[in-house]
Amino acid sequence: MAAVEFSLILPVLILLWIGGVEVTQALSIDRRLNNLSSSIGDLVARSKLVTYADVTKIFDIGPGALFPYCGGPPPQPSCTSAGLQMRITAVDMNGTGTPSVAWSRASGTTAYTSSNNALLLTLVPSALRVANTQVIMAEVFYPYTPAVGKVIVGTRTLNDRMYFVPRLVNNIQLCDDNKQNCVS
C-alpha cells in the first residue's frame, strides 16, 4: 500500500521540485537584469558626456552581469547569441514636459529615433516628465527558456527598464569618439 501511495505522489513531487528550480532560475536572471539596467543607466547618468566607445564599453558589462547564464566560457552561449538586448536613451522633456528622444544607443536591438517620440509617452512615467529636463532610460531584455519546462511554458522575454536623472549636468551629450559632433 505504501508503494502505491508513493507511486501516486512521486510525479507530483518531481513536478514541484522541477518547477521550483525553474522559478528560482528565472527570478535569479530577472534580478541580474535589474542590476544590469541599473548599472548601465547609472554609469551614463554620472557622466557629463559619453562617446560611442564609452557606451560600447558600458554595454560590455552585460556578459559579466548575466554570468553563468550567458557570456561564460564554452559551452555557455555568448550573451549576444543568447539574445541579450540593451538600450540607453536620453529623453528630453520640452517646456510642457513632452518627451522626445535626444539620443539613443543599443546593443542587440535597435536604438530609438525621433519617430519613437509617441511611444515615449507610454514608456516615461508622468511623474518623471518635468519641463526642461532630461531623463536617462536604461532598458534590458533577455529571452529566458526554461531547461525542463520549455515545452509547457516556452520562451519568455524578461525585461527591465530604469530611469535616471543626470547628476553633473542638465543634459548629457553623446559625441563621436573624437568628442565632436555631439548631440544633447
Image: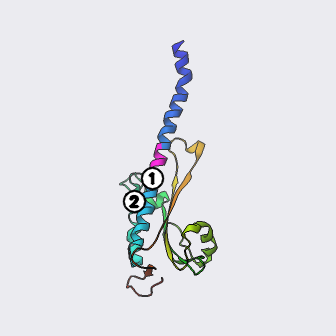
Q: Residues within 10 Å of mark 2 (few under 14, many from 20)?
A: some
Among the two numbered marks 2 and 1 on one chain, the one whose residue lies closer to the N terminus: 1
Q: Is mark 1 on a helix, strand or loop?
A: helix
User: What number of labels is visible?
Assistant: 2
Q: Is mark 2 on a helix, strand or loop?
A: helix
- Is 110 rendered above or below residue 76? below
Q: In this view, does 102 lie to the left or right of 36?
A: right
The magenta-colored residue range is: 24-29
Residue 1 % position (x, y): 54, 12
**Identity of the residue drawn at 42% across and 83% down:** 176
Q: Name the residue under label 2.
A: 63
Determine the CA span between mark 2 and mark 1.
Answer: 14 Å
**Identity of the residue drawn at 60% across and 79% down:** 96
Residue 171 % position (x, y): 46, 80
The residue type indicated by label 2 comes to Pro
Q: In this view, does 179 lie to the left or right of 137?
A: left
Q: Mark 1 points at which residue?
A: 31
- Give 26 or 126, whichever is nearer the viewer: 126
Residue 94 % position (x, y): 57, 80
Q: In this view, does 179 lie to the left or right of 95?
A: left
Residue 130 in sight in this render: yes
The residue type indicated by label 1 comes to Arg
- In the picture as drawn, the residue positioned furthest to the right comes out as 118
Residue 124 in sight in this render: no
